[in-house]
Amino acid sequence: MKILIRLAKEAKQYKTHYVTGILAVMVTTAVSLAAPKILSSMTGMVSAGITEEGLRLIAVYVGILTALYLVKWLSRFVSTYMLHVAAWNLVNNTRVKLYDHIQLSSMSFFKDKQTGDLLSRVVNDTANFEMLYAHVIPEFITNTLTFAGVLVILLVMNWKLALITAVVIPLVAVACVYYAKKVRPNFKAAQRLVGDISAEIQDNISGVYEIQAFGQEAQEHTHVEERAKKHTVAILKALKTSGVFHPLIDFVSSMGTVLVVGAGGYLAYKHQVDVEDIVAFLLYLTLFFTPMQNLARLVEDMQTAYASGERTVQILDSPIEIHDAPDAVDIGKARGEITFDDVSFDYGDGKDVLHDVSFTCKAGEMIALVGATGAGKTTITKLIPRFYEPISGSVKLDGVDVRKITLKSLRGNIAPVLQDTFLFNGTVAENIAYARPTAKFDEIVAAATKAHIHDEILEMPDGYQTKVGERGMRLSGGQKQRLAIARAILRDAPVIILDEATASVDSDTERHIQQAINEINGKHTIVAVAHRLSTIRNADKILVLKDGRIAESGNHEELMAKGGIYRDLYVKSGGGE
């Protein structure tokens, strides 16, 4: 019920459609309850012998039945359409809301999540809400009303037969409760395993080059087959229970009919019930047992929807840790001064990544971060745009704590160029303009020229309209890096973050990237994580990090003269003496 109530909050905006659909369901149910009584009356008239008056009355009954069935057809159309409108709009709204929540979540949210599993929750799990709101809940209401209405009618017609019929109700109720408890874990496991399959396939498609390059096709086939097999086992386990449950409900319902036929025959023999009443009773019995038979299917569908709802609500109710403070302000175009004031940070595992880090990078300066892997360089670059928040201390932009700046304003002043550059499956121009979609074509060209990639773009098959492929697979690493730099230049942000921008390129490409960096040096505040130390010789300040602390700081000449950690790193990197 908690899950249903939680999902109901998401569905309340479609209440008009839903209430209309449910009212139509009630009309359909009322017609279904009225029709057998009219049919039994017609049967009684026929069995008693038809007179001219009776013939006219039968004609009236035929007209009434025709009208009722027309109303039933119309009400079923209204209920089906309205409920599906509400359900699919709910699916659409929940998918978008779920996507937005994932998109706004802090980086810590993704550390233990798989892309394929999140995709399965957004696409597959939300689709099951249609089954819940367009089928399960309306049919549950229909079956409940039908069951209650028929029970009242049967009690009025013949309370003895009604009580005999009701003998099977406790048996069905116990069976349903037992079935729900047995089958729920299996459906929940099945939904989780669908996410696992999606995650495995998504990873494998993304890494298909590595799979083929290392000849691991057979191994990955085995992995996918194992996950698919686990899902099949979970589903079959649920269906095995279902295979026992559904026939059992049918058997119990059939035995109820047998009891009524036997008892009805005896009462007819004793002249305690009329033939037309027995006919009516049998007609109503179909309506009486159908809800119980449907309940078996509804319980199964409910478990699937419940498992999906649980997985969806788990994401929707997860806290968004990084959000605007109530008093956050829009600082407009920043100058670009960055200050770290006694900043300490860990990723939630208790292992400090940064310890009391303090430094200031003035507007327009270039500051370089160097050090061994795991020293905390990339962490610093993630704290500036507030992808994470420090455990203690503060990060400031132009003297304002970044926690007091709106995320849109803060990140609008920062342009990142990462080692693993992500390009969308669009054109070269579209990827450069992603930083500023309203940019004119000549502005895109100007940014590409400054990034020293313009000439190479012109040599591509369709120039700036060349499709880069998924994740930019049609481009070289150096081309992707320079497109990212062009994107950052086009954004015209005061702060540019370069995270290992030349780590995986050849010396010629490195020269082009270095030229691109020189184009923006002095015009923007640059925070550069350096792998090749020769690329940051011109930095205004170099911070050498060791074990999360600033071990050395100064410019290239000063640090080389000290003969400390930086000099050793520079020599080892091939920079020379």
Image: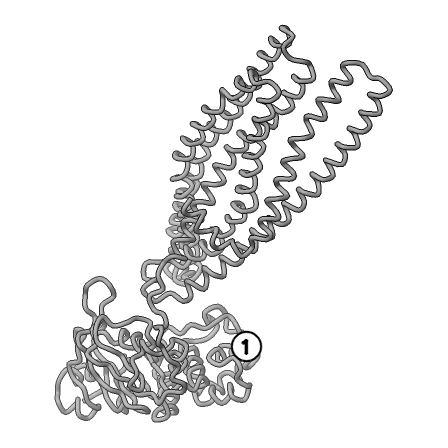
Quarter of the image with the C terminus in it: bottom left
The image quarter containing residue 465 is: bottom right
**Of the residues shown, which amino acid type is indicated by label 1?**
Thr
Residue closest to the far top: 270
Residue name at image x 57 percent, y 12 percent:
263
The residue at 42%/35% (across/down) is 180
- Residue lying at the far right in this picture: please name it: 52
Residue in front for this viewpoint, 387 or 425: 387
Task: Please give the residue where the numbered disc 1 appears in the rendered image.
Answer: 466
169 over 381 or under it: above or below: above
Relative to 131, is 344 on the left or the right?
Answer: left
Q: In this view, does 380 lie above or below 99?
A: below
* Rendered location of residue 336, percent (x, y): 33, 87
Dot 1 alpha-carbon crowd within 10 angstroms: few under 14, some 14 to 19, many 20 or more: some
Vertical comparison of 82 with 241: above or below: below
Q: Residue 450 or 252: which is nearer the viewer?
A: 252
Residue 330's spot in the image, x, y percent? 39, 81
- Residue 101 percent location from the top left of the image: 42, 63
